[in-house]
Amino acid sequence: MKFGCHISIKDGYLGAARHALSINASAFQYFPKNPRSLSIKQYNVDDVESCKRFCFEHQLISISHTPYPTNLTPVKKKKEQIIESLLNDLVITDACGSVGAVVHFGNQISETNPLASYQLMIEMLNSVLKRWNGQCKILLENNAGKPGSIGTTLEELVQVRNLCNDPEKIGFCFDTCHAFASGLWNGENWQELQTKGTELGYWEHLEVIHLNNCKYPTGSGIDRHAPIFHDGFIKEEQFSVLMSAPELKHLPFILETPHTDSNSHEEDIKQLMTRWGSS
């Protein structure tokens, strides 16, 4: 099993990779630039190339996460800025040798036209990907809304990918907290979800798992991450079922859980390896 966590790039991309290795992670996630900005980043070429070499030498898997303002269903005046920002994220992600850049699924933009959001998402993805010829992918992440909200089903994720002009440049990110909060995975229906994902062709394009517990019950629609082993509603035995799924065993599991000095991600990764490292 490959376990890791989200790591700051305050010491550069190579610094993030070195930190991941120092805490015995086999994977890590990072923001390619300021997480609260869509500004274009002029990155250090030596830093990204060193990061790529280091990850290759140490068999580290890396994933980037686009900044919070990135939105695939933006207002008109923000469209071009988001497209340019996403392309910048992809360039940095690719230069670091990362698998892909996680992007949140879009939001509902019309009360009268339920297809409007999907149409805009496809337009945005097409606009970005027609200009992108690198190796890394855009990784669409499932949403955490209440059951029936946009972006909470495998069908939506797969259909948006299928309807894009360059589906081979798109993969998926499965967030356990989001899935639990939306009721997609309620902790007891993994076999059903497993079958549905196989029928839809979802698993073959899944690249990363965001491994998070949920502070609220399944179906709450509330996106609040909790530590894996305490303070969450997803039980350890429910995580065990997910960990043993053959569709997921080869993928990196990335923690986005809250932590303190007394409950560090290093300790979390150690516990994960002890509990499921040989699964």
Image (cartoon, helix red, strand yellow):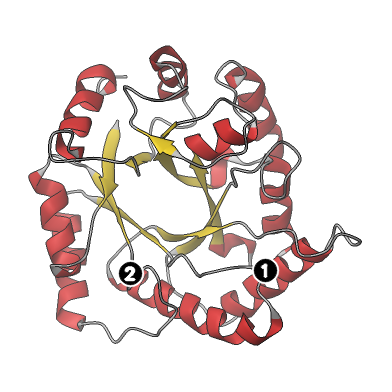
Nearer the observer, disc 2 or disc 1?
Answer: 1
Q: Residue furthest toward the right? A: 112
- The residues tagged by marks 2 and 1 sit, at their Cα atoms, a distance apart of 21 Å
Compared with 100, 34 (above or below) is below
Relative image position of residue 96 (x, y in whole percent): 27, 68
Query: In the displayed structure, does residue 84 sit left or right of residue 48?
Result: right
Query: Dot 1: few (<14), some (14–19), or many (≥20) neighbours within 10 Å?
Result: many
Relative image position of residue 250 (x, y in whole percent): 38, 35
Query: In the displayed structure, does residue 179 sit left or right of residue 2?
Result: right
Compared with 209, 11 (above or below) is below
The quarter holding residue 144 reads top right
Relative image position of residue 135 (x, y in whole percent): 42, 67
Q: Residue furthest toward the left? A: 22
Pointer 2 or 1: first along the chain: 2
Query: In the displayed structure, does residue 112 sit left or right of residue 225?
Result: right
Compared with 58, 94 (above or below) is below
- The residue at the point 17 percent across, 59 percent down is 16
Q: Who is closer to the viewer here, 238 or 162?
A: 238
Q: Who is closer to the viewer here, 252 or 237?
A: 237
Three-letter code for the amino acid on which mark 1 is drawn: Thr
Query: Dot 2: few (<14), some (14–19), or many (≥20) neighbours within 10 Å?
Result: many
Query: In the displayed structure, does residue 273 sit left or right of residue 207?
Result: left
- The residue at the point 58 percent across, 77 percent down is 128
Mark 1 and mark 2 in contact (Cβ < 8 Å)? no
To which residue does mark 2 refer?
A: 32
The quarter holding residue 179 reads top right
- The residue at the point 69 percent across, 40 percent down is 153
Asked which secondary structure carries label 1, the reply is loop
Q: Which mark is residue 87?
A: none
Q: Quadrant of the C terminus?
A: top left
Three-letter code for the amino acid on which mark 2 is drawn: Pro
To which residue does mark 1 refer?
A: 73
